[in-house]
Structures are given as C-alpha cells and as structure tokens.
Amino acid sequence: KTMVSHIPMALAETFHFSGGGEPLLCSEAMPIISYVNEAFPWVKIIIRTNGLLLERCAKELARMKIARLEISLHATAQTNDMILQRKGSQAIFEGIARLRKYLEEYGTHMYIDFHPAVSLLNKSEVPLLIKKAHELKVHEEETDGPDRDVQV
C-alpha cells in the first residue's frame, strides 16, 4: 500500500511485476496484486516470470485480474535447464497447463506469452517452442487490447 500510495493513480495504466528477479518468489506479490485489483481496477497488471513457480501459484493467479503473463523461456525443457543451469523446466509447461485449467474453471482470462531469448544454443528449437505454445494455447488472442507483440 505504501509503494502504491506514491504513484499518481490517475495516470497509472499498467503495472509490470518483474523486478530484478522472480516476482513470484516475493511473498507479498499476491497480496499486492490483489490490492491493486481491488483498489485500482483500471490498472492492467503484467507479470514477467521464469515460470518455474507457475505450477505452485496457478490457482491463485487464475483468481486474480492479470492481463498478461510473460514467461521467459529459452526452448524445450532440456535446453532451458541447460541454459539456466538448473533442473525443473518441465514444471513450466505443467504450470501453464494447470493455469489454463484454472482459468477455464473460474471463467477468467489471461494472455500468456513466451519471451524466448534465441541464440546459437537454442535457435534450432524455435519450431518446437512454437508447437508447444500452440499446444498450451500460449499467444492466444488477447481479450482486452491490441497489444499482440511477439518479442524474440
């Protein structure tokens, strides 16, 4: 509330939750988003995440008014694990599927977007990522605005 109180709300249109790390790691992220939803319903919320916590947060995210979820993903789970130097990227795809299930169950909408960083390490996997996006209904048409960019 203190952070938001310093922002001229009449001018606020979009809040981007990304920060210098993973916004879903912040224990206060959900209460902040909920507060913004309730107090300032005209503000469009965008979250940029690495997606590793989506499976755990899917139900709560689906209940909130979030316009866009941007997932920084390099390629298939195996390549993403290699680039991030950690395991668990398969959970990103499982988290998206779970989130889609909850969005349907609650009758809510959220535009989900992949933000891949394409390089020599993963350029051959771009077609696989496109197929996976189609399978998970990523990049489905947005319901509230013309902002339909694909950033590569």
Image (spheres, grey):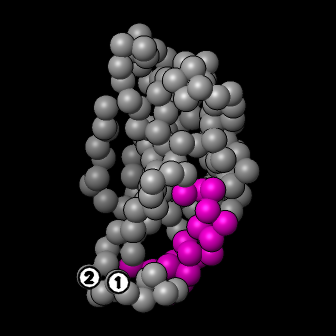
Q: Is residue 40 visible?
A: no
**Mark 2 or mark 1, which is nearer to you?**
1
The answer to whether 102 is drawn above or below residue 16 in the figure is: above
Q: Which region of the structure is painted magenta? A: 23-42
The answer to whether 118 is drawn above or below residue 48 in the figure is: above
Rendered location of residue 90, percent (x, y): 67, 29
Q: Is residue 13 left or right of residue 20?
A: left
Image point (39%, 46%), residue name: 141
Rendered location of residue 62, percent (x, y): 63, 60
The answer to whether 7 is drawn above or below residue 22 in the figure is: below
Q: Which mark is residue 11?
A: 2
Q: Which mark is residue 7?
A: 1
Pick the front one: 116 or 18: 18
Name the secondary structure under disc 2: loop
Q: Does residue 106 belong to the magenta stretch?
A: no
The alpha-carbon separation of the residues under discs 2 and 1 comes to: 8 Å
